[in-house]
Image (cartoon, rainbow, N blue to C red):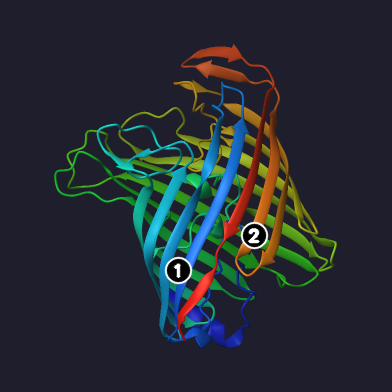
């Protein structure tokens, strides 16, 4: 039904401008003129990112290294793209890597490791039956491509988490955008001690006005659900299913000038819910309010996020926006307020060549923490994050 509806809409509505490649995002549309071509793509992002935080909420660390995705890209038909290669992650100063799924900085696992790189095979099969619709199997367009707000998805995961693998549907038109996906994080065999792990998500937007017009008004809807379980394992961890969601209004002004380009404001409410857990959690459900001001001037992007939450567990967002400490066991804080100003620089020097830098602060007034049931008053929280990034993504034509 979804496919049929998309086909009908595609006949009546022009497509929205496709997503462009940037530091952390990929252009996903297929160019029909590339039919029959074979390309060698060497996609690399080198990074140096430093996080300085207070120890009660999360611990600070530095990420120096690079990711590279060498792969062959073939277009067997005007609407089909196949990609095959490897995904390699290396941190400078590290020679051994724990051999399991990465969702953040991995914990050390000495008995089972890879040497030199954290390495995975890479494969993507994609079909674009109409210009507005893309269906992807294998390695999907994940990370920042989903366009989730920062409290739901930490942009730093573009550097540390494994590429997302599973299935994805992307629909893009004048009136709506839809990105629906399943990321299969851990497959299990029969009688395995580990649990099956998967994340499903929807990032959608209803365009009340044209996104390319001077004034934009839209309704974003974002949902993330994470499930740990399975029926053929022998794990004793039990089933856990958690969900995050957010929706609201987004306003924007497109100036399309060489200097001042964009002014936007989003006002969103968010929620957390424990759908199922065989073991008690710190919070069963929670709420949040998020507002974000965004200004784009030249190659600079300025942001200011104001976040207020209660009993909120964020699945993939920065720990600063959650109500559970990741640095101290059983520490939580039922109410928090976070102010997150930042500036990002991104410059394109040519096809597939990007230089970027960012600096942001995380500021929170003093709040009450709980160590199990005992309240502890904390000082004002202040943290910073700064990074330098270089993406080089050349595409070499091997067969025209």
Picture quarter with the N terminus:
bottom left
On screen, residue 367 versus residue 63, left or right, reads: right
What is the x, y in percent for residue 32?
51, 86
Residues 253 and 192: in front is: 192
On screen, residue 133 versus residue 15, left or right, reads: left
Could you tell me if residue 28 is visible in this image?
no
Residues 337 and 358: in front is: 358
On screen, residue 106 versus residue 384, left or right, reads: left
State the residue position of label 1: 169
Could you tell me if residue 91 is visible in this image?
yes
| Label 2 neighbour load within 10 Å: few <14, some 14-19, many 20+ | many
The numbered disc on residue 53 is none
Q: Toward which corner of the image does residue 76 lie, by quadrant?
A: bottom left
Q: How far apart are labels 2 and 1 at the CA level?
A: 27 Å
What is the x, y in percent for residue 344?
71, 49
State the residue position of label 2: 354
Q: Residue at x 40, y 29 (%)?
A: 281
* Outermost left residue: 191
Foreground: disc 2 or disc 1:
2
Q: Residue at x 60, y 86 (%)?
A: 12
Q: Is residue 17 above or below residue 50?
A: below
What is the x, y in percent for residue 336?
63, 29
């Amino acid at each position: 039904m979804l496919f049929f509806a998309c086909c009908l809409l595609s006949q009546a509505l022009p497509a929205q401008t496709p997503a462009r490649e940037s530091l952390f995002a990929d252009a996903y549309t297929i160019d029909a003129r590339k039919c029959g071509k074979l390309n060698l793509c060497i996609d690399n992002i080198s990074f140096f990112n430093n996080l300085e935080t207070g120890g009660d909420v999360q611990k600070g660390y530095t990420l120096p290294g690079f990711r590279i995705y060498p792969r062959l890209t073939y277009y067997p038909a005007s609407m089909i793209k196949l990609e095959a290669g490897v995904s390699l992650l290396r941190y400078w100063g590290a020679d051994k890597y724990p051999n399991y799924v990465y969702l953040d900085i991995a914990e050390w696992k000495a008995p089972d490791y890879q040497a030199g790189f954290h390495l995975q095979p890479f494969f993507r099969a994609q079909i674009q039956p109409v210009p507005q619709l893309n269906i992807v199997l294998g390695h999907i367009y994940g990370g920042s491509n989903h366009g989730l707000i920062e409290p739901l998805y930490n942009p730093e995961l573009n550097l540390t988490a494994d590429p997302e693998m599973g299935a994805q549907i992307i629909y893009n038109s004048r009136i709506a955008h839809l990105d629906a996906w399943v990321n299969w994080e851990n497959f299990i065999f029969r009688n395995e001690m580990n649990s099956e792990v998967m994340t499903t998500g929807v990032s959608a937007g209803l365009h009340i006005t044209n996104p390319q017009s001077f004034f934009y008004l839209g309704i974003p809807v974002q949902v993330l659900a994470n499930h740990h379980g399975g029926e053929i394992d022998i794990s004793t961890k039990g089933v856990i299913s958690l969900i995050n969601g957010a929706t609201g209004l987004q306003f924007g002004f497109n100036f399309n000038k060489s200097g001042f380009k964009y002014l936007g404001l989003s006002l969103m409410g968010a929620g957390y819910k424990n759908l199922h857990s065989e073991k008690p959690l710190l919070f069963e459900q929670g709420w949040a309010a998020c507002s974000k001001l965004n200004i784009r001037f030249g190659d600079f992007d300025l942001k200011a996020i104001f976040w207020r939450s209660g009993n909120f567990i964020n699945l993939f967002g920065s720990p600063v926006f959650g109500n559970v400490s990741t640095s101290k066991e059983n520490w939580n804080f039922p109410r928090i307020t976070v102010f997150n100003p930042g500036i990002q620089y991104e410059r394109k020097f040519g096809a597939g060549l990007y230089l970027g830098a960012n600096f942001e602060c995380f500021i929170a007034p003093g709040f009450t923490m709980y160590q199990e049931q005992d309240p502890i008053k904390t000082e004002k929280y202040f943290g910073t994050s700064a990074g330098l990034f270089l993406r080089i993504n050349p595409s070499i034509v091997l067969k025209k």
